[in-house]
């Protein structure tokens, strides 16, 4: 607590500055998530305050970020679609998933897994981050040109037959659930169907139209129609926002250009009464807990999203800890990764309780805080309080912000979040794999797979597939590399120094083989060929195992197969210099003593040679 107030002036200035920078982004992320601007503000307020108070990085500013919002959009869209397109009905399940993600982050921290997050392969992270940028760009094209599918009368009309079909199916499902025999109560079914009003059909048609145009694929589908229905005022507001954000940075970076664009373009639009589309109303007053998430909780509505919640938790962990590393480099300090995950998890859980979207450590806001003088946890707490004050004092004014301005802000975020470092490296990375006639870089292939699958299919599955492919390719590379160094191949080998005095008359009866390096999945095929190398005259095989440090399960069974084959051919096998780990593995499945009795295991070649001289005779 003493350290908390050791830099009050710097922390206050840093926190206030970071809070101001966070404001437009919080509003934009809230709108783009589908829960409204207040969800972005609530997320920024509570995550910033509690992640700073309880986290392990003193100068970190947390809140909604582009990656977290992109995944949240997937969650929200899926749950809303399952609840007849009603955000209100879907909200308890949505917030439950967000809270679950926060609790999972706390669990990751308590289990001490924070230090392992850094092992996620860079190509997976690169492909994911670039996909986030592409997703934001594609999904913000429609609002930036003022096209909203639900309001396009001709487009919505195309879904009227489907809407009627869906509503009739719902009636039949309700009757089936109530145990009513539809054929016997057909008049009742017809009566309910006739009771459907045109207004209800219109609402259902609008829901289907919005669903058709949702996501990246939906945006691409309706783009030709959208380009025929451009609202030039909305497009002008979005372009003006983008122009100011990039242009003002060339003048000065002392004032956040995003905030300047928000104030200037919104002020002009409102001052000249241009008749623009506004964002949804921001509720006034202190945020209140959404207790309906507990009263209307349904395990069935949340279970399908457990893996998604875990993805949110892992993504937030990666996002936050990467920002923590940036903060460490700037402040010459050392963050506590597990404590940071606990703080982030608690912040996300509390934000979900109040209806906020999840977030993570935000690099730009953290850098702004440090440059403005922030040094302790107090700066992040002040940033959260600052946003709360702005919401309470300026909520009605913020509600007048043009939707196109936030779309313009998000377009710049999408452009900025892409991993240009990874994209620039594509031509220079070594092409180490061959697919048909093409030679490709495995890192580039993983990045492109994650990028394409994330953009056009599913963010969560794309990351999972990327991790699996990266792991398999890594194992293949290490296998190949180790196999090169693991000598189990050649028949003719150099004689080791302690073998120089081996009796000449026994060289045909005794075959000596040196195994150098681990016996694992990458070298088993060569090892399995060992039986073919043994001369027909040999009745005893000595395996020199002093340099075989490790044996995996694949190597274990390869050894068992070889020993079985030799036993079938009445060939005795002697082990020399067997190390602890391979011996333990072979004892587990009884290779020792079933195939190799303990008296056939020798500590050194000298003792083995004595046994050979005593037990093997020259048959010629």
Image (cartoon, rainbow, N blue to C red):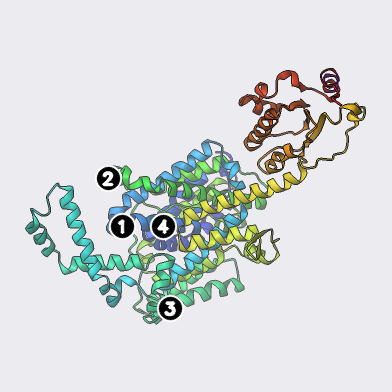
Q: Which secondary structure lies at badge 1?
A: helix
In the rendering, at what x and y percent does residue 29 appear? 44, 61
Determine the residue positioned at 32% across, 63% down: 281
| Whether label 1 touches label 2, CB < 8 Å | no
Q: Which secondary structure lies at badge 4?
A: helix
Which of the two labelled residues, at mark 3 and mark 4, occupies the earlier sequence position?
4
Q: CA distance from mark 2 to mark 4?
A: 22 Å
Which of the two labelled residues, at mark 1 and mark 4, occupies the earlier sequence position?
4
Q: CA distance from mark 1 to mark 4?
A: 13 Å
In the rendering, at what x and y percent does residue 531 appear? 73, 36
**Residue underneath mark 3:** 235
Determine the residue positioned at 21% across, 58% down: 169
Residue 481 appears in view = yes
Q: Residues within 10 Å of mark 4 (few under 14, many from 20)?
A: some
Determine the residue positioned at 8% across, 61% down: 191
Q: CA distance from mark 3 to mark 1?
A: 27 Å
**Residue underneath mark 2:** 296
**Residue underneath mark 1:** 87
In the rendering, at what x and y percent does residue 109 appear? 53, 39
Q: Is residue 538 above or below residue 434?
A: above
| Whether label 3 touches label 1, CB < 8 Å | no
Q: Residue furthest right?
A: 501
Q: Mark on residue 544?
A: none
Magenta stretch: dominant SS?
Answer: helix
Which of the two labelled residues, at mark 2 and mark 3, occupies the earlier sequence position?
3
Quadrant position of residue 430: bottom right
Q: Which residues are magenta?
A: 609-613
Q: Horizontally, is 116 left or right of 279 in the view?
A: right
Quadrant position of residue 432: bottom right
**Residue underneath mark 4:** 74
């Amino acid at each position: 607590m003493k350290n908390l107030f050791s830099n009050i002036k710097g922390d206050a200035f840093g926190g206030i500055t970071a809070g101001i920078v966070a404001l437009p982004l919080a509003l934009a992320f809230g709108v783009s998530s589908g829960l409204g601007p207040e969800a972005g503000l609530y997320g920024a307020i509570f995550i910033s305050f509690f992640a700073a108070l309880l986290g392990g990085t003193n100068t970190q500013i947390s809140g909604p970020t582009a990656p977290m919002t992109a995944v949240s959009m997937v969650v929200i869209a899926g749950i809303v679609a399952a609840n007849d397109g009603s955000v209100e009905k879907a909200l308890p399940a949505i917030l439950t998933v967000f809270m679950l993600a926060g609790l999972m982050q706390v669990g990751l921290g308590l289990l001490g897994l924070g230090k392992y997050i850094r092992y996620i392969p860079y190509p997976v992270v690169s492909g994911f981050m670039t996909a986030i940028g592409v997703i934001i760009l594609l999904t913000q094209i429609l609002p930036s040109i003022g096209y909203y599918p639900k309001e396009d009368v001709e487009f919505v009309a195309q879904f009227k037959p489907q809407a009627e079909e869906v509503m009739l199916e719902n009636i039949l499902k309700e009757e089936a659930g109530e145990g009513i025999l539809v054929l016997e109560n057909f008049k009742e079914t017809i009566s309910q169907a006739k009771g459907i009003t045109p207004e209800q059909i219109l609402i259902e048609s609008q829901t289907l139209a919005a669903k058709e145009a949702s996501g990246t694929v939906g945006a691409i589908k309706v783009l030709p129609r959208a380009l025929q229905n451009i609202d030039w005022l909305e497009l002008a507001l979005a372009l003006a926002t983008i122009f100011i954000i990039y242009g003002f940075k060339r003048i000065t970076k002392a004032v956040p250009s995003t905030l300047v664009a928000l104030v200037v373009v919104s002020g002009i639009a409102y001052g000249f009464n241009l008749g623009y589309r506004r964002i949804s109303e921001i509720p006034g007053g202190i945020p209140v807990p959404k207790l309906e998430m507990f009263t209307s909780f349904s395990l069935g509505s949340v279970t399908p999203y457990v893996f998604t919640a875990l993805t949110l938790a892992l993504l937030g962990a990666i996002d936050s800890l990467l920002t923590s590393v940036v903060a460490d480099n700037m402040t010459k300090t050392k963050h506590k990764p597990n404590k940071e995950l606990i703080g982030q998890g608690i912040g996300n859980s509390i934000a979900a309780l109040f209806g906020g979207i999840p977030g993570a450590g935000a690099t730009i806001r953290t850098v702004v805080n440090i440059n403005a003088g922030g040094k302790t946890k107090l700066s992040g707490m002040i940033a959260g309080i600052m946003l709360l004050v702005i919401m309470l004092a300026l909520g009605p004014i913020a509600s007048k912000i043009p939707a196109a301005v936030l779309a313009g802000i998000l377009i710049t975020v999408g452009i900025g979040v892409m991993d240009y470092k990874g994209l620039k490296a594509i031509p220079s990375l070594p092409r180490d794999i061959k697919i048909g006639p093409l030679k490709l870089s495995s890192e580039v292939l993983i990045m492109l797979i994650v990028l394409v699958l994330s953009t056009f299919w599913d963010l969560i599955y794309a990351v999972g597939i990327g991790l699996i492919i990266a792991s398999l390719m890594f194992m293949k590379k290490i296998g190949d590399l180790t196999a090169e160094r693991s000598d189990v191949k050649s028949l003719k080998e150099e004689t080791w120094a302690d073998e120089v005095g081996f009796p000449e008359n026994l060289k045909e009866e005794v075959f000596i083989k040196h195994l150098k390096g681990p016996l694992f999945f990458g070298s088993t095929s060569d090892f399995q060929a060992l039986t073919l190398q043994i001369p027909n005259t040999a009745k005893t095989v000595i395996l020199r195992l002093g340099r075989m440090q490790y044996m995996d399960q694949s190597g274990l069974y390869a050894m068992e197969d070889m020993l079985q084959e030799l036993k079938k051919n009445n060939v005795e096998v002697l082990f020399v210099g067997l190390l602890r780990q391979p011996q333990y593995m072979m004892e587990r499945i009884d290779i020792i003593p079933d195939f190799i009795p303990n008296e056939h295991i020798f500590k050194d070649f000298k003792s083995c040679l004595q046994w050979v001289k005593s037990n093997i005779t020259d048959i010629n």
